[in-house]
């Protein structure tokens, strides 16, 4: 549903895209009011993980005002100033740490003090991107915009599987006065595949079986495949049993595609075979490579955000087919910042050949995203 603006407050209805709206409100400094949050649900109002996100935003800002209705079905959010610094947060185990970490990744460069965040909770969740995926596929994208690697780091201290979690990560992000415009239209060919298989409170043979299954699929396509195992023991293994895999394909143009798969949550009565997990993850990675583009499809929205907030110059990037989440994010960017993207479908030589000969290998549609940055400036960061 489109936004309604009243007295400079942007009003929304429903719980969809709650995180997008809070994030863009914090960056733009514009107050928002969200009403009718799950009013028809048996359990109406905000969920625990959404309240936890509001608490995290409160920790990284100064002067944020939040008003919740008694039933939790309405929230008013007036953002404060981004301060960053040292932040400790215990994330709700209903969602993965990735749900919260993506927000910090988007806000990090614009804080007053360099961000040093310690997040505890579930490191690998079915609903959210894992911390491994953010480390391997999202941080290199941010590096393209800030250029200097002075303190951008994500360290996985402990892993934690659902439902109890017990994982911990440390995220450090430098502050920048502004982001540079980006022209990124080449993504190259995949040259190697790396991966990590983790096994928490389960037999170590599980990890080896996942590795064999994943390699069995990937070695059909290229020889340079190397998968590590991370068999955590004791307190480093979190509070719940589980295992999973994260695979990364790196191209010769330093583009990273990532895919992941994990075992079913313990206590659900379902059995997960390690061989199935390995093959599922390998197939997902092949699908991601097929989609192509300069960024992994899970982080198209972050690329769009940083392009829009860049200096007043043209940024252009080519991505694979847009995800539904990215499309709604582009709509929200227009509502908060007034940024319009020009989207063009890119045709390739292979497309033309494929139309002539149906036996040709098909190529996923590519979208060229172009916008002019709004010149967003970090007012706390003085020029040297």
Image (cartoon, grey):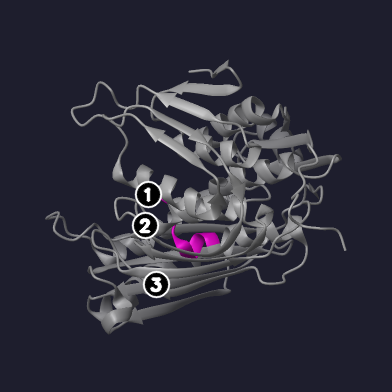
Residue at x-position 81% and y-position 51%: 180
- Tell me if 65 is positioned left or right of 95 in this view: right
Residue 17, position in %: x, y? 46, 33
Query: What count of labels does the image hold?
Result: 3
The residue closer to the viewer here, 212 or 90, is 90
Residue highlighted by disc 3: 197
Q: Secondary structure at mark 3?
A: strand
The residue closer to the viewer here, 88 or 294, is 88
Q: Earlier in the sequence, mark 1 or mark 2?
A: 1
Residue highlighted by disc 2: 91
Q: Is residue 225 above or below residue 26?
A: below
- Please tell me whether residue 375 belongs to the stretch shown in magenta: no
> Residues under labels 1 and 2: Cα distance?
7 Å
The residue closer to the viewer here, 282 or 126, is 126
Residue 50, position in %: x, y? 37, 43
Q: Is residue 162 above or below residue 365?
A: below
Residue highlighted by disc 1: 52
């Amino acid at each position: 549903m489109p936004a309604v603006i009243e007295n400079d407050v942007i009003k929304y209805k429903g719980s969809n895209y709650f995180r997008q709206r809070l994030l863009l409100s914090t960056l733009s400094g514009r107050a928002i009011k969200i009403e009718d949050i799950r009013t028809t649900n048996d359990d109406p109002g905000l969920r625990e993980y959404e309240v936890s996100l509001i608490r995290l935003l409160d920790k990284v800002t100064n002067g944020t005002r939040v008003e919740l209705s008694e039933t939790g079905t309405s929230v008013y959010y007036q953002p404060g100033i981004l301060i960053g610094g040292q932040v400790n947060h215990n994330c709700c185990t209903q969602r993965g740490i990735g749900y919260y970490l993506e927000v910090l990744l988007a806000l990090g460069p614009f804080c007053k003090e360099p961000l040093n965040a310690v997040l505890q909770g579930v490191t690998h969740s079915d609903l959210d991107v894992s911390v491994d995926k953010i480390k391997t596929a999202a941080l290199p994208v941010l590096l393209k915009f800030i250029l200097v690697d002075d303190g951008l780091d994500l360290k996985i201290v402990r892993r934690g599987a659902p439902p109890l979690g017990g994982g911990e990560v440390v995220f450090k992000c430098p502050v920048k006065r502004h982001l540079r415009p980006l022209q990124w239209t080449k993504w190259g060919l995949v040259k190697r595949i790396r991966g990590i298989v983790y096994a928490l409170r389960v037999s170590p043979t599980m990890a080896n079986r996942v590795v064999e299954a994943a390699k069995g699929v990937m070695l059909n396509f290229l020889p340079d495949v190397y998968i590590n195992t991370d068999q955590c023991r004791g307190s480093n293994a979190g509070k719940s049993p589980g295992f999973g895999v994260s695979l990364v394909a790196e191209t010769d143009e330093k583009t990273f595609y990532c895919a992941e798969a994990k075992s079913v949550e313990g206590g659900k009565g379902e059995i997960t075979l390690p061989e199935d997990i390995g093959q599922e993850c390998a197939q997902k990675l092949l699908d991601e490579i097929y989609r192509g583009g300069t960024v992994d499809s899970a982080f198209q929205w972050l690329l769009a955000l940083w392009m829009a907030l860049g200096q007043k110059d043209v940024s252009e990037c080519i991505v694979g087919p847009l995800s539904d989440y990215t499309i709604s994010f582009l709509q929200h960017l227009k509502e908060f910042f007034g940024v319009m993207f020009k989207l063009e479908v890119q045709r390739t030589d292979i497309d033309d050949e494929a139309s002539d000969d149906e036996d040709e290998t098909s190529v996923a549609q590519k979208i060229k995203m172009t916008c002019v940055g709004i010149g967003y400036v970090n007012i706390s960061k003085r020029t040297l």
